[in-house]
Amino acid sequence: MEKKKNRSRKRDAILACLAGTKTHPSADWVYRQLKPDFPDLSLGTVYRNLSEFLESGQIISVGSVGGLERYDYDVSPHAHFICRKCHAVIDVREIPLPPLPELPGTLEACAVTFTGVCNFCQSASSDAQ
Amino acid sequence: MEKKKNRSRKRDAILACLAGTKTHPSADWVYRQLKPDFPDLSLGTVYRNLSEFLESGQIISVGSVGGLERYDYDVSPHAHFICRKCHAVIDVREIPLPPLPELPGTLEACAVTFTGVCNFCQSASSDAQ
DNA sequence: CTTGAAAATAAGAACGATTCCTATTTTTGA
DNA sequence: TCAAAAATAGGAATCGTTCTTATTTTCAAG
């Protein structure tokens, strides 16, 4: 028996915030983004709603990047490139997944994550020379 | 100019502990594992040494699983299956990586992670019926 | 339009993993 | 044997996240 959900302007705004960016934000980023429009928004509300979106499959988690959980509105299959310097999370498409091997359990999700230094940080550090 | 490293019996034991298990342990697991043999071992020492091993490339991180960072002595290319119920991390081999697309930065590492419910938890929950 | 029960929230306390700090101990090379 | 450098213990501090409780909002029924 699942609980009835009431409408909430703030919940809508949190989801819209995720939908409207490609930055794969953290809870805090969403909070700071919405705070001007919702001066009494609390960080706990952002966390609670993000958790609910996760559970209902409306969003996915990119995992913890630099200690901050990052979220993604795009639930379609794609990979991520994560910069270990600036912690940018960038979509990587056109990754044809290989035929899956036998797994030690039932598969629910698959994440492909590349790590390195993004082009921006790369040129920034060569400038610094 | 890199710093000279002195020998340390505890550091050796921490690395050996990782080398001797396939459970992809957390810092706390390593700590509890070694505490009987090193009664004055402190958790900070485990964290510090794990960080140093990470930085020197002697081990890799599996990422945060259920809020705990998990480490892997096996640095050869392989994937992981993570059970969302018991948080087991299980090696998955024979994943031929697809030809890589153009990436938005320099590639340093690639992680392939499957998520689901492991066979053990699966049968445990069907028993519970 | 009321009204009351359920749902959502704000505010901040609590929690827990990890990092940091400092005095002490260990290691190493001379 | 000795002194400088490295490593550690112990515990405080940090900080992302979760939890608690009193208050506010939503919504359906009357």
Image (cartoon, coloured by chain):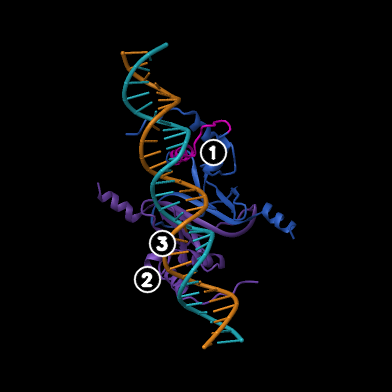
Chain colours: A blue, B purple, C cyan, D orange
Name the residue type under label 3.
Answer: Asp
Numbered range of the magenta stretch: A36-54
For the residues bearing labels 1 and 2, Cβ distance under 8 angstroms: no
Residue B39: numbered disc: 2
* Relative image position of residue A17 (x, y in whole percent): 56, 36
Q: Is residue B73 above or below residue A12?
A: below
Q: Residue at x 47, y 63 (%)?
A: B47
Q: Could you tell me which secondary element the residue under label 3 belongs to? A: helix
Q: Is residue A37 located in the magenta-colored stretch of the structure?
A: yes
Chain of the residue under label 3: B
Quadrant housing residue B106: bottom right
Quarter placement of the C terminus of chain A = bottom right
Q: Nearer the viewer, mark 2 or mark 3?
A: 2
* Relative image position of residue B112 (x, y in whole percent): 50, 56
Residue B95: numbered disc: none
Of B84 and A37, nearer the camera is: A37
Q: Which residue is mark 3?
A: B28
Identify the main secondary structure in magenta.
helix
Q: Nearer the viewer, mark 1 or mark 2?
A: 2
Q: Which residue is mark 1?
A: A31
Q: Could you tell me which secondary element the residue under label 1 belongs to? A: helix
Q: How many marks?
A: 3
Residue B24 visible: no
Image-based side of A92 in relation to B84, left or right: right
Q: CA distance from mark 1 to mark 3?
A: 32 Å
* Relative image position of residue A46 (x, y in whole percent): 49, 38
Quadrant housing residue C4: top left
Residue B2 visible: yes
Of B13 and B44, nearer the camera is: B44
* Relative image position of residue A105 (x, y in whole percent): 38, 54
Name the residue type under label 2.
Answer: Pro
